[in-house]
Image (cartoon, rainbow, N blue to C red):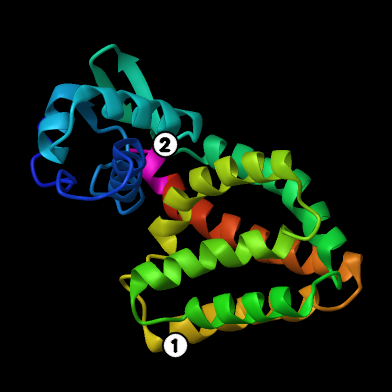
Amino acid sequence: MVIQGQVRSIASANSSAVDLVTAEIRRAVLTGTLAAGAEFSIRDLAAQLGVSHIPIREALRRLESQGLIVLRQARAASVAPLSTADLAAIYRLRYEIELPLAGASAGMRTPPQVSELDALLEASRDLDPEIAWQAHYDFHEALVHPAANAWDDRVLHTLWFAAERYTHLVFDPTQITDEERARRYETHRVLRDAALIADPAGMTEALRVHLSTNESRIRAHIAPLEEH
């Protein structure tokens, strides 16, 4: 349960303590600093982050709802394990919800929304991995934005957060060659082009291919890990 050095103190930051704790623990989970299955105590986590137990508990409840953390008991938690079954469930729901929304959004963007999509596409190949990763997340959100309502957003954000830890394993933005960066840019440029045409079926198929390709690569990566 020792987590020394795995999360960073947020005691001096000027934002909501719960938001900061949530972001820092999520970062540690997504990057693998807090590994799948790792157990830790709320007391140790509070000491490492430099905050009280109250925001820690609230942050862990948020992360549990996103499928990243498992609350074991009142004073302990663990990082949710990685599994192909979990991956399949996440992507099954993404196909059901994300694809039709992206299709319904095709060709429905205002000029400012098109500019935003272009800016996110460019930022997704930024040399700063944090900028690139956030832009990638926001790009997928922008693909469905014209047709999504508040409930769609809530559900999709939960799925995207849950999927992030899997995609981070295979598409780690801190370990990327120029060739791979260009490949990722091109795959998302295809989605951007499809999003601007009033062709729902074409947009839906482009995103389905994109998601299924990623799911297959992730599954191939984590399947051997389940065997150990």
> What's the amino acid at mark 1?
Glu
**Drawn side of residue 20 relative to residue 185, left or right:** left
Overall secondary structure of the magenta stretch?
A: helix
Residue at mark 1: 179
> What's the amino acid at mark 2?
Leu
Counting residues from the N terminus, which is met first, the one under dot 1 or under dot 2?
2
Q: Residue 68 carries which label?
A: 2
Secondary element under disc 2, as helix, strand or loop, is loop
Q: Do callouts 1 and 2 mark residues in contact (Cβ within 8 Å)? A: no
Please state the horizontal and vertical placement of residue 179, each as a whole percent of the image. 44, 88
Viewer-side residue, 104 vs 150 = 150
- Residue 225: in magenta span: yes
Q: Relative to residue 158, is residue 41 depicted above or below? A: above
Residues drawn in magenta = 224-228
Residue at 44% x, 55% y: name it: 221
Q: In which quarter of the image is residue 214?
A: bottom right
Residue at 35% x, 40% y: name it: 22
Q: Residue furthest front?
A: 14
Q: Relative to residue 163, is residue 128 depicted above or below? A: below
Residue at 66% x, 58% y: name it: 212
Viewer-side residue, 138 vs 217 = 138
Q: Quadrant of residue 202?
A: bottom right
Q: Relative to residue 197, is residue 218 depicted above or below? A: above
- Residue 214: in magenta span: no
